Image (cartoon, helix red, strand yellow):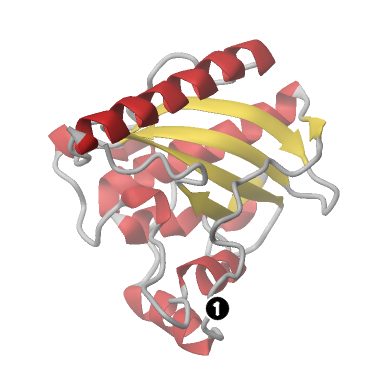
Amino acid sequence: MRRTLVFAVAMLAVLAVLAWGAIAGAQEATPVVPPPSQCGIGPRAAAEVEALLAAATPAAGSTDAAMPFVLPAGTPADGPTVAAITATIREALACGNAGGALGALSLVTDAAIARDLAPPAEGVGLYVLTFGTAAPAADAWHTLLAVLDTRELEDGRVAALVIVGDPARSAARARLDYVLFAEQARGTGGSDQYLFLIDGWIADPYVLGPG
């Protein structure tokens, strides 16, 4: 009974975000399953990722764990910016569908890997866009469901709420992530062809749970 109630509340929250995003301007309204063929960059080498993590300082535990997530202030992104960050997310999913987490990490900056994947002092780190270590089968490819409320931040980065369909999730089969993008960032071979790379993320910022 409790699990059913938690799931119902989580789904209501997702629907509320979707409805609000439609009003605020959802940029990707039609579900898109980016196939591996749309990945135009090779996967990160495991040794490269391990070196970045080894050099990172473990993050201290947050003292704000009980604080609700609040979207940072910013100005709505213009059309070309929205198109560019949406293209980055779609290709990151395509690369993840092609090569698992190492594929998705090919479009993530070195700084974000060291900062957001490094295990915190008291627990395990995050992994990007829910991909595991191996390339998923075709029936487990991730889907881009929506890009919501894209805004330009004061530090020059762009932020968006991204809803990704994940067949491995038990019930909701989707997750909402807060994703940051850095313009013309350099992170791995060939990345200079992309206007934006992923420069950080908060998984499940509203704590909707796995469903």
Instruction: Inspect this view and state whether residue 135 appears.
Output: yes
Give x and y (percent) for residue 76.
78, 28
Query: Which x, y percent locates residue 135?
Result: 21, 52
Image coordinates of residue 45 in percent, x first then y, are: 36, 71
Please name the residue shown 74% across and 34% down the image.
151
Report the quarter where the C terminus lies. top left
Quarter of image, res 77: top right
Q: Residue 87 location in percent, x, y?
A: 54, 34
Quadrant (top left, top right, bottom left, bottom right) of the N terminus: top left
Could you tell me which residue is drawn at 65 percent across and 48 percent down? 181
Q: Which sits in the foreground, 20 or 83?
A: 20
Q: Along the line of sight, which residue is nearer the eye, 83 or 61? A: 61
Location of residue 145 (image quadrant): top left
Q: Inspect the image, locate mark 1, and give the three-letter code of the amino acid beneath it.
A: Ala
Mark 1 lies on residue: 59
* Category of crowding for the residue at label 1, using alpha-carbon neighbours closer than 10 angstroms: few (below 14), some (14–19), many (at least 20): some
